[in-house]
Image (cartoon, rainbow, N blue to C red):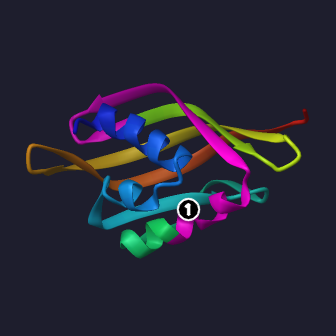
Amino acid sequence: MTPTELALAYAAYVDAADVDGLIGLFTPDCVLVVPDPPTRLDPVVEHRGAAGVRAALAPLASFASTRHEVGSAEVDGSAGVVLGTAHHVLEDGTDLRWEVRYDDEYRRHGDGWLIARRAVTALSIERIRP
């Protein structure tokens, strides 16, 4: 899988709530750094390895659904920046729309690439009521 394909697969696995598939996109020793909204929108909470990825994504189970849209993915060697929108929909239909930036480091694995480090920045969070 190319780094650009990783960006698309990440969005698809998150939206399908396929945590095992998502973990397969990361190296075993990966680091996933996420924000701590609403206090911090920059990447400040660090998670390591498969268990860390699982823990970082656990809060997504509280949403009725999610929809991640990849806007762009720019890759330079083993580093990339992915920009997109993440919709986190509550039971009442409220959409917590995040404009996000993923700063990635990739590592070769077999014939493709895996994510070795991903830092997630929420550029903005907007509450859209139905």
Q: Is residue 32 left or right of residue 2?
A: right
The answer to which quarter of the image holds residue 6 is: top left
Q: Is residue 93 left or right of residue 119?
A: right
Q: Which residue is mark 1?
A: 57
Looking at the image, which residue sits at the far top? 71
The answer to which quarter of the image holds residue 29 is: bottom left
The stretch in magenta equals 55-80
> Is residue 33 something one can see in this rendering?
yes
Residue density around tag 1, few if under 14, some if 14–19, many if 20 or more, within 10 Å: some
Q: Residue at x 52, y 47 (%)?
A: 16
Looking at the image, which residue sits at the far left? 110
Q: Is residue 2 left or right of residue 46?
A: left
Image quadrant holding the C terminus, namely top right
Whole-percent x, y for residue 33 in the image: 50, 60
Foreground pick, 83 / 8: 8
Whole-percent x, y for residue 64 in the image: 73, 50
> Is residue 45 something one can see in this rendering?
no
Q: Residue at x 46, y 55 (%)?
A: 18
Foreground pick, 97 / 120: 97
Whole-percent x, y for residue 75 in the image: 30, 31
Q: Residue at x 37, y 55 (%)?
A: 21
